[in-house]
Image (cartoon, rainbow, N blue to C red):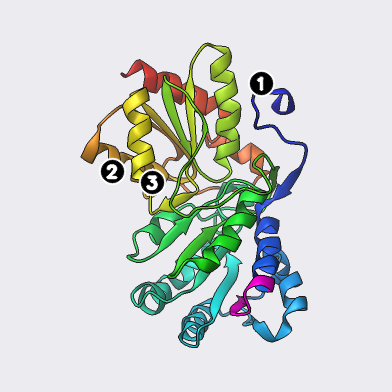
Amino acid sequence: MEKTLDTKYTYTEKKDTRSGFGDGFLEVGKKNKNVVGLCADLIGSLKMGAFQKEFPDRFFQVGISEANMMGMAAGLTIGGKIPYTGTFANFSTGRVYDQIRQSIAYSEKNVKICASHAGLTLGEDGATHQILEDLGMMKMLPNMTVINPCDYNQTKAATIAIADHEGPVYLRFGRPSWPIFTPADQPFEIGKAWKMIEGSDVTLFATGHLVWEAVVAEAMLREEGISVELINIHTIKPLDTEAVLASVAKTGCVVTAEEHQFNGGLGDSIAQTLVRNHPVPQEFIGVDDSFGESGKPVDLLEKYGLNAENIVKAAKKAISRK
């Protein structure tokens, strides 16, 4: 069904978003000699090998020493370097939160924290590695920019764009092969939402892997005569509140979709914006206060309700509450 959807956002290839990071990292390294890499013993998993091979003098394998990696990265910025750190999202946040808060966010160090294997779609490694709290942890830190792109192309574009942003960035991406449905030559503007589809009955705000599920849901709802406005929120912080409020003023109800806990994620940010400015019915697609488990990525998304079918149900419920 996915390849025959009546929508312009179709795909012919799937690729993991971590490869988008790896390819973007190599490209930005060629453009900017101040870009350096640090990795905590996961070069293959983070797809950082091409950069390491091309620029061995600008790459540091720190081993299983994530806290030390964050301290090194902070120090490198003092000499004008732009460090990209690489490890799993769980180890990029939960394991090193104190170092990020004290050494990077507090002093606004120009560190790019690049975090792979986020969310349920990490799959078989299970709950201990499937961090679902990272967006909330990072967006609560003052001075931190938080980005969660949706496919290979958008991840590559984001990886390149953050080098020109002065200040700390958390860039989140994933492990599984995923549809590539956004343009290869897309501009990436930090903090600017992307209205993918214009609609009038309900707004879908989606981020990360769930953007594709929202694309599928939009087509399903359109077949039932429901007009959906689909907005890709690749930047969780700073949130594009202008785009959020403009859409909600038109549709009058909202569904948020993310591979994250309800608490602290995109839905939380949207809800705070709405309650302060324009309260409307909102439904949440995400993980409801639980850990994950071992399983195949798509099976886990289905079990935890993070798929197109559940977005459709949530949209109908939001519309019924207007």
35 is within the stretch colored magenta: yes
Query: Which contiguous range is marked in magenta?
Result: 30-39
Tag 3 secondary structure: loop
- Residue 78 left/right relative to 273: right
Residue type at tag 3: Asp
Residue at which label 2 appears: 272
Do the numbered discs 1 and 3 sit on residues whose CB atoms are within 8 Å? no
Marking on residue 130: none
Residue type at tag 1: Asp
Residue 44, can we see it? yes
Measure the C-alpha gap from mark 2 to mark 3. Answer: 13 Å
Residue 123, can we see it? no
Q: Position of residue 109 (x, y in %)?
A: 42, 76
Q: How many marks?
A: 3
For label 1, count other residues whose C-alpha is less than 10 Å away and answer few (under 14), some (14-19) or many (20+): some
Q: Which residue lies furthest to the left in this view?
A: 276
84 is within the stretch colored magenta: no
Residue at which label 1 appears: 6
- Residue 135 left/right relative to 10: left
Residue at which label 3 appears: 240
Q: State the residue in front, 213 or 110.
A: 110
Q: Earlier in the sequence, mark 2 or mark 3?
A: 3
For image coordinates 72% across by 35% down, the residue present is 11
Q: Earlier in the sequence, mark 1 or mark 3?
A: 1
For label 3, count other residues whose C-alpha is less than 10 Å away and answer few (under 14), some (14-19) or many (20+): some
Q: In the rendered image, which quarter contains the N terminus?
A: top right
Q: Position of residue 253 (x, y in %)?
A: 35, 25
Tag 1 secondary structure: loop
Q: Earlier in the sequence, mark 2 or mark 1?
A: 1
Residue type at tag 2: Gln
Q: Where is residue 292 in the image (x, y as percent from the top left)?
A: 53, 47
- Residue 94 left/right relative to 214: left
